Image: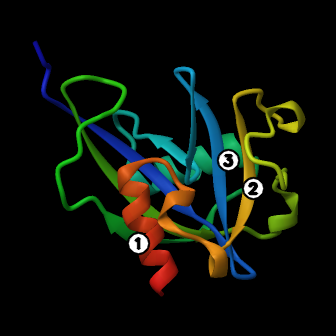
Amino acid sequence: MSNERFNIRVYGLLVHDGRVLLADELIKGQRITKFPGGGLEFGEGPKDCLVREIREELGVEAIDVEHFYTTDFFQSSAYREGDQIISIYYTFRVADPSMIHTSEVLFDFANALDPTESFRWLDLSRASIEDVTLPIDRVVMGMLITR
């Protein structure tokens, strides 16, 4: 029996020096590469969610937050049966991108601040939609590449 509920996700696109920031995460035993962000909490606006998620995950403040894309097709959740995913993407800047703890290695949990999440930069000139795991992220990556 499905619950048929909406699961709203909010993600940030940080592009700096021709590179985009990616998050490598271990989610329910699976290695996932996605954009930084997470779930919208009840009573929170999407922009507020992004600012909170960036502060929690990256330890920096998101500034100049601008809407980029909202899911415009049906996507079921890979993790919760009965959930429909709606993802909202924003571009943002940070005062000093060098303050973000990143690695050059995929899934570098050993050197990360969080043992289940690490961050790295991806050169957009060499990027493809396969560089991210989730279906909606792949649509967004395609948009970033063609800009």
Residue type highlighted by circle 1: Phe
**Where's residue 9, x and y in %?**
39, 45
The reply to whether discs 2 and 1 touch (Cβ–Cβ < 8 Å) is no
Going by the numbered disc 2, the residue's amino acid type is: Arg
Asked if residue 97 lies left or right of residue 89, the reply is right
**Residue that extends furthest to the top in the rendered view of this protein:** 1
Q: In this view, does 128 lie above or below 71?
A: below
5 left or right of 47 in image = left
User: Is 93 placed left or right of 88 in the picture?
Assistant: right
Quarter-of-image position of residue 63: bottom right
**Res. 120 mark:** 2
Label 3 Cα neighbours within 10 Å, binned few <14 / some 14-19 / many ≥20: some
- From the image, state whether disc 3 or disc 2 is nearer to you: 2
Q: Earlier in the sequence, mark 3 or mark 2?
A: 3
- Label 3 and label 2: CA atoms lie apart by 16 Å
Please name the residue shown 41% across and 72% down the image: 68
Mark 1 residue element: strand
Which residue is drawn at the image coordinates 13% and 27% (left, top)?
A: 4
The residue positioned 83% from the left and 37% from the top of the image is 112
Q: Residue at x 84, y 51 (%)?
A: 103
Indicate the quadrant containing the N terminus: top left, top right, bottom left or bottom right: top left
Q: Find disc 1 in the rendering and name its residue.
A: 68
Residue 55 circle label: 3
Q: Give the amino acid type for the residue marked by disc 3 in the picture.
A: Arg
Between the C-alphas of marks 2 and 1, the distance is 21 Å
Q: Residue 135, which numbered label?
A: none
Q: For this rendering, which residue is in front, 48 or 70?
A: 70
Label 2, secondary structure: give it: strand
Task: Kindly indicate the quadrant of the structure image that contains residue 92.
Answer: bottom right
